[in-house]
Amino acid sequence: MGSRLGVSDEKILALGDYATSPLYTEAERVALEYTDAITLSDRDVGDDLFAQLTTKPKEPAAPVAPAFDPITRTLDAEVQLSNTDGELRAGMYGRASVRLEVHPQVPVVAVNAIQQSEAQKYVFVVNGSTVARRPVQVGVDFSDGQLFEITQGLAAGEEVVTAGADAIGDGATVRATRDIDPYTGAKASVVPSAPDVGGTKKD
């Protein structure tokens, strides 16, 4: 039976000792540990174990189909993965991410900073105690839509209004409060810089 599945009978007989048996690779041990955790025991499956299971080598994608399937609107892509140790087998499922493009060193603002009038998006840039309305062009979003990259209209290091922007106008006088959540008064997390903001990723 084992030979028909591409697995030696010796390996099948050693299944009960997969954790220590030299017949199993590290990836196979992780997969079997995960299987035991979700089927044969009351053990919680933590993020660390799941991360080990889903970690795979990053490899370049090979040719992509020339056209979308007209019914499913999907596109087939072929990926070449090295499998010298035999960890990957026919019928296995995997997870992949596709980075469409990279925008290095772009300014990033919180979604609350972006206002819109008709078709024009804008932000209020802080200049001392006043603000100036500045048209901007918005790029991709990340952090579940809480942050947006600004591709035009804003320079790195400029500060923008993130709370109450919908109630002020160009030239308005403001009192800037930094690193404080204006709604709760708690210390707010700083919006991260984006040294390597990527385009939309599909899983």
Image (cartoon, helix red, strand yellow):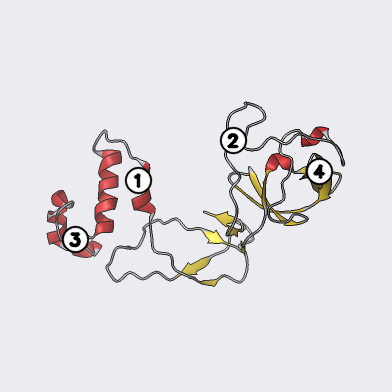
The residue at which mark 2 appears reads as 188
The residue at which mark 1 appears reads as 48
95 left or right of 197 in image: left
Q: Residue drawn at (59%, 35%), measured in percent from left and top?
A: 188
The residue at which mark 3 appears reads as 2
Q: Nearer the viewer, mark 3 or mark 2?
A: 2
Label 4 secondary element: strand
For disc 4, the neighbor class at 10 Å (few under 14, some 14 to 19, many from 20) is: few
Q: Nearer the viewer, residue 54 or 176?
A: 176
The residue at which mark 4 appears reads as 116
The reply to whether the C-beta atoms of the residues labelled 2 and 1 are less than 8 Å apart is: no
Looking at marks 3 and 2 on the same chain, the residue that comes earlier in the sequence is marked by 3
Looking at marks 4 and 3 on the same chain, the residue that comes earlier in the sequence is marked by 3
Label 3 secondary element: loop
Q: CA distance from mark 3 to mark 2?
A: 58 Å
Residue flagged by tag 1: what amino acid is it?
Asp
Query: What's the mark number on residue 189?
Result: none
Looking at marks 1 and 3 on the same chain, the residue that comes earlier in the sequence is marked by 3
Q: Residue drawn at (48%, 70%), measured in percent from left and top?
A: 60
The reply to whether the C-beta atoms of the residues labelled 1 and 3 are less than 8 Å apart is: no
Q: Nearer the viewer, mark 2 or mark 4?
A: 2
Q: Nearer the viewer, mark 4 or mark 3?
A: 4
94 left or right of 197 in image: left
Residue flagged by tag 2: what amino acid is it?
Ala
